[in-house]
Amino acid sequence: AQTVTQSQPEMSVQEAETVTLSCTYDTSESDYYLFWYKQPPSRQMILVIRQEAYKQQNATENRFSVNFQKAAKSFSLKISDSQLGDAAMYFCAYWYTGTASKLTFGTGTRLQVTL
Amino acid sequence: EAQVTQNPRYLITVTGKKLTVTCSQNMNHEYMSWYRQDPGLGLRQIYYSMNVEVTDKGDVPEGYKVSRKEKRNFPLILESPSPNQTSLYFCASREGLLSYEQYFGPGTRLTVT
């Protein structure tokens, strides 16, 4: 069964600094997708970034980028130039078209941004 | 505007009192699902539906029921709620089984006393 592990329950970063959130996963599949979702206090689930496993190039969305290491099954999120609005819970998630096509989530990392 | 709506957004109820959380999407999506979110556990899938009248259990289906009589609606039913069902619930939809883009509803905070 696929599992997603986020080993950092909480992280803190100063405004304008860079922070990296870690995520590892376990799968026997070769073609899948990985996601990072942001959940601010409003509780809305917001897609931050997506990575297709067949793509070697790391995905980037403005200040957000990932370090995708397929062999190591690692998928970390880097937030550059952190802003107060980045404070939220971040979830790593895995998706594969099999297994009822569900998203498998990690347990989340709460990011605090300080002045 | 493409969206998934859930009602109610907040609900406090007592043990054993049947309740329904509604979910509706306006994108003509085939695939819909329910998740619950608990601290330290992330989001876990409760039930999913691949189309009208086609539903199946997710990872944590005990104590829940669903139905899919119309394509747009996917209600979650708790026939006899218990305190361990206190949680944050999300409905989500996707165009189809092979679509990776998932749309989430705003969430329903349920408290069972």
Image (cartoon, rainbow, N blue to C red):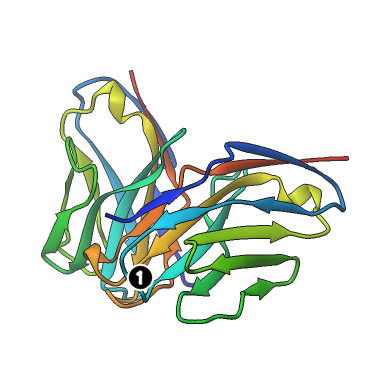
- Residue B92, image quadrant: bottom left
Q: Can see residue A94?
A: yes
Name the residue nearer the viewer: A83 or A9: A9
Image position of A62 with respect to A25: above or below? below
Within 10 Å of disc 1 (Cα), the crowding (few <14, some 14-19, many 20+) is many
The residue lying at 17 percent from left, 35 percent from top is: B63
Q: Report x, y in % for residue A49.
A: 58, 67
Q: Report x, y in % for residue B45.
A: 30, 50
Q: Report x, y in % for residue A104.
A: 37, 55
Look at the image and tell me in which quarter the N terminus of chain A lies: bottom left
The single residue placed furthest to the front in the displayed view is A71
Q: Chain of mark 1?
A: B
Q: Report x, y in % for residue B20.
A: 25, 41
The residue lying at 45 percent from left, 81 percent from top is: A54
Look at the image and tell me in which quarter the C terminus of chain A lies: top right
Image position of B51 with respect to A2: above or below? below
What is the total number of numbered labels drawn onto the structure image? 1
- Residue A77, image quadrant: bottom right
Name the residue nearer the viewer: A9 or B71: A9
Image position of B25 with respect to A104: above or below? below
The residue lying at 25 percent from left, 57 percent from top is: B74
| Residue indicated by mark 1 | B94
Q: Secondary structure at mark 1?
A: strand
Image position of B54 with respect to A113: above or below? below
The single residue placed furthest to the left in the displayed view is B53
Relative placement, left or right, of B52 versus A45 is left
Relative placement, left or right, of A112 versus B90 is right
The amino acid sitting under disc 1 is: Arg
The single residue placed furthest to the top in the displayed view is B113
Q: Can see residue B72?
A: no
Name the residue nearer the viewer: B41 or B91: B41
Relative placement, left or right, of B23 versus B39 is left
